[in-house]
Image (spheres, grey):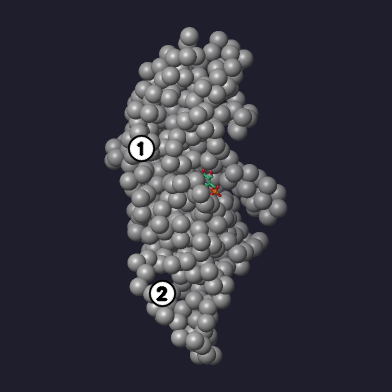
């Protein structure tokens, strides 16, 4: 049966598990080029290996990150697993070096899988007073000679901005690779590959998708050897994104810059407003001059914005009062600002920090906001009404 070519304006969803390869020669060509992730000839074999709808969404991300390649996976965590597997090569695997201020799920993966199951040699680097000391970092790199260093451009929930430029310069001096989770900053604020990073990771569940309706992850880079190793791993363990999610992502990502610009602008105004409120003891936002990494954020993001996450601490005479105020605040804003444990949604959502992070951040008054792209006056109005009624 001859198939009709439809003049669709975008890549449709190709749900085929396997693709027709016609004859033995075409089959041999397709299999021999497969780890090249080649687009010429654009032959597909099997959707766990590579799928046209997934490739189309990857091309959108390559444009945003300015990367030579991008590989989409089913979640941010599978992107992290894929990226790190590049550096695992049996008994000869060297030490892996992670900054401590990274996503809690990544820390759990390191502890429960990389250390406990795979027996890998891992060390952590901790910040001092909310900032990373690069002199100490250089000494650690010199002493430990790790295979790679792993950082997040903006950390969670204290929103520490890592000096990716300085970190990459030091790492390169000692031949150490740099892996950056750029989920919170996004390429709209910063492109780590331009400053020497080797792999950039995103939880595309967040700002790239932007609507809280799918989970996806992506790794991007320029080095072909890294890509080939990641292509193989993604295929062997079956991390490749589904065509349906790739289709939604390729559509939703068209509005990413518009959405994120507005989210950053809302967050900046809201952080300044929260900082003036007497019921709030402290606000963490890299755009505020009292944030320990404000200057680094200025340097990295060119004053374009400072991200769309804010953490603040409700004041109280003691822990019990702080807890009561937190619970009251959550209840008072709940119609407009919901407690949803994710980030990057269209509307502002929140998370109580102590309930999620426990002993790591035990302040009961702390709340993390993922700021949305709703009308700013509506957002400030919701929060100011809640704070006013808590004073009364
Ligand atoms: N990286 C960061 C910074 C995250 O915040 C998250 C999830 O919240 C992940 C990675 C994991 O992404 P996913 O939930 O899509 O697996």
Residue drawn 36% across and 44% down?
259
- Name the residue at the right extreme: 117
Residue drawn 44% across and 28% down?
284
Query: In x, y percent, where is residue 191?
Result: 36, 50
Query: In x, y percent, where is residue 233?
Result: 57, 65
Determine which residue is flagged by label 2: 39
Res. 209 in view: yes
Residue drawn 47% across and 51% down?
204
Residue 18 vs 65, above or below: the answer is: below
Res. 270 image quadrant: top left
Query: In x, y percent, where is residue 93?
Result: 61, 58
* Label 1 packing within 10 angstroms: few (<14), some (14-19), many (20+): many
Viewed as shown, does residue 263 lie left or right of 353?
left
Query: In x, y percent, where is residue 374?
Result: 38, 36
Res. 340 image quadrant: top right
Q: Secondary structure at mark 1?
A: helix
Q: Which mark is residue 264?
A: 1
Whole-number angstrom distance, CA of label 2 to CA of label 1: 36 Å
The answer to whether the residues at label 2 and label 1 have Cβ atoms under 8 Å apart is: no
* Label 2 packing within 10 angstroms: few (<14), some (14-19), many (20+): few
- Foreground of the two, 45 or 349: 349
Residue 276 vs 131, above or below: the answer is: above
Residue drawn 57% across and 68% down?
48
Viewed as shown, does residue 372 lie left or right of 51?
left
Residue 200 vs 349, above or below: the answer is: below
- Foreground of the two, 173 or 248: 248
The tag earlier along the polypeptide, 2 or 1, is: 2
């Amino acid at each position: 049966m001859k198939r009709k070519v439809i003049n669709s304006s975008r890549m449709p969803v190709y749900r085929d598990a396997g693709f027709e390869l016609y004859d033995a020669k075409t089959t041999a060509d397709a299999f021999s080029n497969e780890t090249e992730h080649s687009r010429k000839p654009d032959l597909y074999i099997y959707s766990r290996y590579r799928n046209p709808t997934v490739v189309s969404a990857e091309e959108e991300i390559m444009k945003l990150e300015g990367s030579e390649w991008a590989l989409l996976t089913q979640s941010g965590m599978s992107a992290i697993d894929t990226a790190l597997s590049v550096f695992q090569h049996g008994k000869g695997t060297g030490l892996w070096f992670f900054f401590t201020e990274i996503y809690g799920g990544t820390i759990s993966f390191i502890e429960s899988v990389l250390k406990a199951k795979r027996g890998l040699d891992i060390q952590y680097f901790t910040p001092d007073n909310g900032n990373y000391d690069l002199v100490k970092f250089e000494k650690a790199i010199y002493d430990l000679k790790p295979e790679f260093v792993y950082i997040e451009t903006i950390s969670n929930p204290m929103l520490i901005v890592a000096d990716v430029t300085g970190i990459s310069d030091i790492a390169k001096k000692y031949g150490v690779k740099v892996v950056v989770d750029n989920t919170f900053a996004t390429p709209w604020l910063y492109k780590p590959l331009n400053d020497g990073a080797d792999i950039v990771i995103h939880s595309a569940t967040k700002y790239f998708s932007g609507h809280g309706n799918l989970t996806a992850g992506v790794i991007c880079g320029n080095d072909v050897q890294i890509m080939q190793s990641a292509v193989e791993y993604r295929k062997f363990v079956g991390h490749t994104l589904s065509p349906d999610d790739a289709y939604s992502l390729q559509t939703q990502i068209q509005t990413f810059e518009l959405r994120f610009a507005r989210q950053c602008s809302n967050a900046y105004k809201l952080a300044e407003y929260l900082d003036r409120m007497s019921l709030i003891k402290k606000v963490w936002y890299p755009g505020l001059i009292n944030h320990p990494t404000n200057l680094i954020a200025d340097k990295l993001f060119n004053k374009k914005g400072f991200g769309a996450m804010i953490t603040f601490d409700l004041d109280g005479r003691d822990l019990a009062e702080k807890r009561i105020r937190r619970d009251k605040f959550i209840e008072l804003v709940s119609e407009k600002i919901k407690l949803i444990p994710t980030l990057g949604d269209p509307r502002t959502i929140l998370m109580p920090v102590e309930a999620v992070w426990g002993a790591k951040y035990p302040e009961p008054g702390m709340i993390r906001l993922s700021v949305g792209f709703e009308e700013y006056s509506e957002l400030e109005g919701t929060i100011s009404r809640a704070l006013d009624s808590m004073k009364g």
